[in-house]
Amino acid sequence: MNLDIDYYELLEVERTADEKTLKTAYRRIAMECHPDRNPGCDQSEAKFKAISHAYDVLKDPQKRAAYDRLGKAAFENGGMGGGGQGGSGFGDFSDIFESFFGDAFGGRQRGPARGADLRYDLEISLDEAFHGKDAEITIDVATACGTCEGTGATPGSGKRRCNLCAGHGKVRAQQGFFVVERTCPTCHGRGEVIESPCRACGGEGRLDERRTISVNIPPGVDEGTRIRVAGKGEAGPNGAAAGDLYIFIHLSRHKVFERDGTTLFCRVPVSFTTAVLGGEIRIPGLDGAEHIIVVPDGIQSGKQLRQRGAGMPVLQGRGRGDMVIQIDVETPSKLSARQKEILREFRETETGEECPQSKGFFDKLKGIWDGIAP
């Protein structure tokens, strides 16, 4: 069989095949030509390498697009990170095959499993998000056993090769014409066993304990920001590397400000006279400074004023966002007799030009009524 042919022909699919069709075709052909099913057959092994390489290219949208445009030339000299088929060994495709069939046809022996990652949810105030803070958190975590230093063995003793799998970490069993390879049940895939397990941790190499960890929260964090603390997750079994700790930030509600990215919003009520005549309002910012906002005369409710550089700091960057103030004009509800008299005098002198929006609205209504009047 000529293996230097079109990848689609190798997998026996059309060029328009979707991901599911590609996967089904690869599974079928891989089962037929896998070297463990055809021991000693060089042609089957070569075909298995070829279809594995073809599937590795076509299952990746970017590689597939490059192949559709340029063919195999897209991957010459290491292009697209694909490499050439001829330089790939059988082991290069074991991860592809094992993603479908597990360890049924064997696989590479893995090292000790890394410890699990941990998650911690931390709530802070908006002020703390602005300035940043050093926080201490307390978590329950599996840590390396101090007695055996994480090895799982009694001090002074060691490990020996597993007798069942002869140190390979896997055992084989014949099932019909299949040779099925599974993780060794004695050493759990490590290839070695502990001669004298540590009494403190039972041979696992780790113990549960409560630990206090200091964490730096940088200025500018937002709701959902994730902070990674490397190596502070659970210790791995039998001396394997520890996982990481991920801290997810949550912000408590502020009494005045709302936040959108680096922008701070606040609604500010202003008096009727300030709205009419203009003036100034003073807003204390999260930075501790008092920000003076100039209110132009004749401002309307809902109008927004922007104070540049008075918002939140940029996370791990430079500069700050803006503060946006939304004006809410407050209608006076408690007036003295004199104040009411002044307002009545003002109403008597109104021409309608003082409030153009109101005049325009009622002119439109008048036009509607005039149009439907008999």
Image: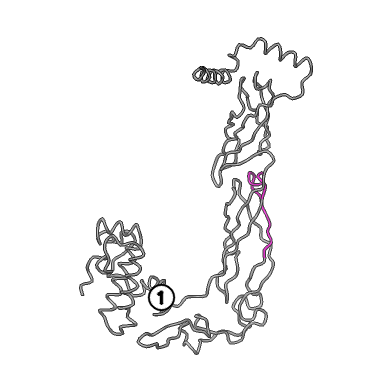
Please indicate whether residue 2 sits to the left or right of residue 360 in the image: left
Question: Which is more toward the observer, 277 or 317?
Answer: 277
Q: Which residue is mark 1?
A: 101
Please indicate whether residue 182 sits to the left or right of residue 200 in the image: left
Question: Which is more toward the observer, 277 or 335?
Answer: 335
Question: Residue pushed farthest top?
Answer: 349
Say which quadrant the N terminus sits in. Answer: bottom left
Q: Residue at x 78, y 14 (%)?
A: 338
Per the image, label 1 sits on a secondary structure element best described as: helix
List x then y, in percent, for residue 249: 61, 52
Question: Which is more toward the observer, 367 or 71?
Answer: 367
Question: Residue pushed farthest left?
Answer: 2
As drawn, 345 above or below 197: above
> Is 271 colored magenta in this rendering?
no
Region in magenta: 124-139
Q: Residue at x 26, y 69 (%)?
A: 10
As drawn, 200 above or below 225: below
- Amino acid beneath label 1: Phe
Question: Residue pushed farthest right?
Answer: 337
